[in-house]
Image (cartoon, rainbow, N blue to C red):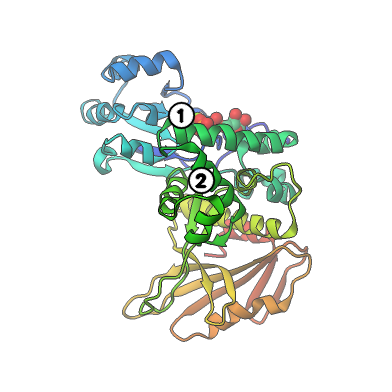
Amino acid sequence: MQNSSIERLLKLPERTFFLFGPRGIGKSTWLRQTLPKAAFFDLLDAALYLQLFRNPHDLEALAGDQAAGSWIVLDEIQKVPALLDEVHRLLETRRWRFALCGSSARTLRRGGVNLLGGRALTRFMAPFSQRELGADFDADFSLQWGLLPLVQVDRQYAADLLQAYVHTYIKEEISEEGLVRRLPPFLRFLEVAGLLNGQVVNGQNIARDAAIPRSSVDGYFSILQDTLLGHFLPSYRPQLKVREKARPKFYWFDAGVARAAAGLAYDPPDRLWLGAALETLVYHELRVYNHVYNKHRPIAFYRTPAGAEIDFVIETRKRTASSPPHVACLEIKLAEKWNRGWERPMRALHKVEGIEVERMIGVYTGGRAYHYDGLDVWPLEEFLRRLYEGEVF
Ligand SMILES: Nc1ncnc2c1ncn2[C@@H]1O[C@H](COP(=O)(O)OP(=O)(O)OP(=O)(O)O)[C@@H](O)[C@H]1O
Ligand SMILES: [Mg+2]
């Protein structure tokens, strides 16, 4: 990569916030660059950790004589959840602003602390987006290895870095924070979950394949979700009446991490795998755009009554008493040539009464854009450019 420092899309909030995100995605780097003048407390520093663990009260003295409105950064806050009571107090008495950074809210909540009772905003950080990488974005590389900053800045070691990521970071995070009672069943689950990246979740099959009790599966998935390692994509139900609950799909936050979790870091991926990696990448970009640009639109997949699928359905306007739901549909294909048969599920949804399909977009890995009868087909990078220009939702 040419650039040594990539500018992130995330904007600094004006008030106290939590910053959550998986390991190695650039949280600390962003905080140091965005708040260069802040008093910075890194709880990975063993001496500092011990001091504040024993005496959270020392924080005020360590921060020194800061004016109201000054920024204080507490990195790895999950290591000393008790500090949040201190933060709470200092928010009121000193009127300082805090950036509170950690890998997830789960361990904080487990510590029994209240997350400042709504006084703090919550921001999330994800791996690099295509928008951030700009000219350094390499679609082929990113489908194979994902978008972790750690990996993107050191591309020649991608396989080793991802292997280490799963083996060290994830394991440490999960066992150190005491998120599971026993590690071996969880590790078997991780491998199975890696293999089914982008698929509809079937708890029973997963339990069987990983040789774990069915009752552990949901808890394990919620660990992945809470630590922001994966996300459920719900099934879109246009008719509110429909009772039957369709199963969600599960996507890892990063295709490279999914690959290493599946134990495939050193095996060349096949086309089926790369197809799921492409969906994973698009879903990641949709979530980044949704969060950074404050859209907060619900995203789902859709299975037509005939059993065909639309990869992503984004609700651009909620159903109300006076108007139908409005949606944008995306069909994602790893293919050099666009096959017009792939448009069918989107066109079928378009005909369903009571849903306003505002956009139908095909995304593929070919080189040309097309427009057919109300439907756009865009090469991946053109799609991503238009997404960030607000043309999709
Ligand atoms: N904006 C950036 N530009 C270029 N490289 C970056 C950027 N952000 C992060 N990196 C690279 O990724 C690595 C991990 O970043 P960083 O330590 O900030 O992540 P983190 O989210 O704080 O991880 P952890 O949870 O482990 O503390 C850095 O060492 C750096 O090599
Ligand atoms: Mg960090």
| Residue 116 sits in quarter | top left
User: Is 51 placed above or below 239 here?
Assistant: above
Q: Is residue 337 left or right of residue 222?
A: right
Q: Nearer the viewer, residue 214 or 382?
A: 214
Q: Nearer the viewer, residue 350 or 224?
A: 224
- Three-letter code for the amino acid on which mark 2 is drawn: Leu
The answer to whether one can see residue 319 in this image is yes
* Mark 1 beta carbon near ligand 1 (under 8 Å): no
Residue in view at x 63 percent, y 80 percent: 344
The answer to whether one can see residue 30 in this image is no
Q: Nearer the viewer, residue 177 or 346?
A: 177
Q: Is residue 141 left or right of residue 107?
A: right
- Three-letter code for the amino acid on which mark 1 is drawn: Leu
Instruction: Tell me residue 60's x, y (percent).
Output: 28, 19
Q: Residues within 10 Å of mark 2 (few under 14, many from 20)?
A: many
Q: Secondary structure at mark 2?
A: loop
Q: Is residue 281 left or right of residue 246?
A: right
User: Is 205 placed above or below 148 here?
Assistant: below
Gap in angstroms between the C-alphas marked 2 and 1: 26 Å
Q: Secondary structure at mark 1?
A: loop
Instruction: Tell me residue 105's x, y (percent).
Output: 38, 40
Q: Residues within 10 Å of mark 1 (few under 14, many from 20)?
A: some
Q: Which residue is mark 1?
A: 35
Residue in view at x 70 percent, y 38 percent: 159
Residue in view at x 44 percent, y 16 percent: 46
Please state, as top left, top right, bottom left or bottom right, where the N terminus lies in the image.
top right
Dot placed on the residue nearer the N-terminal end, 2 or 1: 1
Q: Which residue is mark 2?
A: 229
User: Is 382 placed above or below 331 here?
Assistant: above
Residue in view at x 70 percent, y 33 percent: 154
* Mark 2 beta carbon near ligand 1 (under 8 Å): no
